[in-house]
Amino acid sequence: MRSLKAIFKKQIKDTLKNIPTLINFIIFPLVAFAMSFIMPTGFGEEIPAEIAELLAAGMPNMVLMMAAIFAGMGLIPAVAGIIAEDIEKKSLRFLNMAGVKPPAYLLGVGSVTFLLSIGTSIAFGIISDFSGRAFWVFVASMLSGVAASIVLGATIGIFCKNQQAATGLSMPFAMILGFGPMMAQFNDTIARALHVFYTQQLNVIADYLTLGTSETPLWQAFAIMWANVAVLAVLFAVVYKKKGLKG
């Protein structure tokens, strides 16, 4: 517990000094807010009949797509960079030597990102004009995706010797997971291929909340997302034990 608190405090200080990382949590909702005026998605606007038909046919709600991009593409490189920075500065080596276990390190580092993401997820829910149960289901789905991206980003970061390498290695994963759901809206083959990934389940939940229909039950979408988290957590623990002391 002491090591967890120490890592948490350290990460708060590091994050507050890292302006680019902090901007990540603000810029995506701001872009979504701007899109809300371009694409009618709420705020009492009447959706034109032709837009409503396209939405019903599966055209992505751009605000919700931006939320999926944040949960996938926005967070993976950021978390990978945080871990790689610890490796570059030899902090991870000292933590390992001090006996810090993988769960404590991941929770200490990831909890700061997770807490910041709560505000971002709520902002997306407000911009998307959700209310009542739909609002909280959306926020819960966003935070499930955030948890998966944190663990994936941390796992990628362990492989890298510096932040530059972390950015390069994490971007392909981030691009596929961030933009995949948007492409899946227009291609059934892509949708089936991405079905097992958490960002595609964000897409499924968004369809359920906006259109009232979904081929995947809501509980199953959440189950797939948290199965992603569990698998990635095990992978992180294995990689941490093998690579951590070499940081």
Image (cartoon, rainbow, N blue to C red):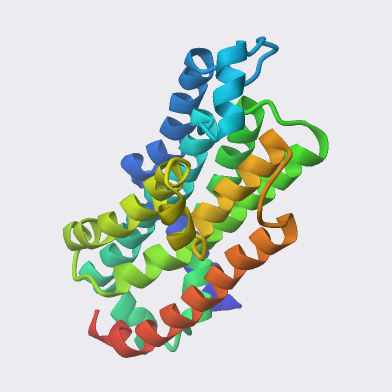
Q: Residue 86's quadrant in the figure?
A: bottom left
Residue in view at x 54 percent, y 46 percent:
116
The one of 7 and 181 positioned closer to us in this rendering: 181
Give left or right: position of 15 versus 209: left
Residue 45 seen in render: yes
The one of 196 and 111 positioned closer to us in this rendering: 196
Residue 2 is situated, as x and y percent measured from the top left of the image, at: 57, 77
Residue in view at x 26 percent, y 71 percent:
87
Residue 7 is situated, as x and y percent measured from the top left of the image, at: 47, 68
Q: Residue 95's quadrant in the figure?
A: bottom left
Which quadrant of the rendered structure holds the C terminus?
bottom left
The answer to whether residue 135 is above or below residue 141 is above
Give left or right: position of 159 versus 234: left
Q: Residue 19's quadrant in the figure?
A: top left
Residue 112 seen in render: no
The answer to whether residue 196 is above or below residue 58 is below
The one of 30 and 54 positioned closer to us in this rendering: 54
Residue in view at x 61 percent, y 26 percent:
127
Residue in view at x 62 percent, y 42 percent:
206
Residue 1 is situated, as x and y percent measured from the top left of the image, at: 61, 78
Give left or right: position of 194 versus 80: right
Tally the numbered discs.
0
Residue 173 is situated, as x and y percent measured from the top left of the image, at: 32, 59
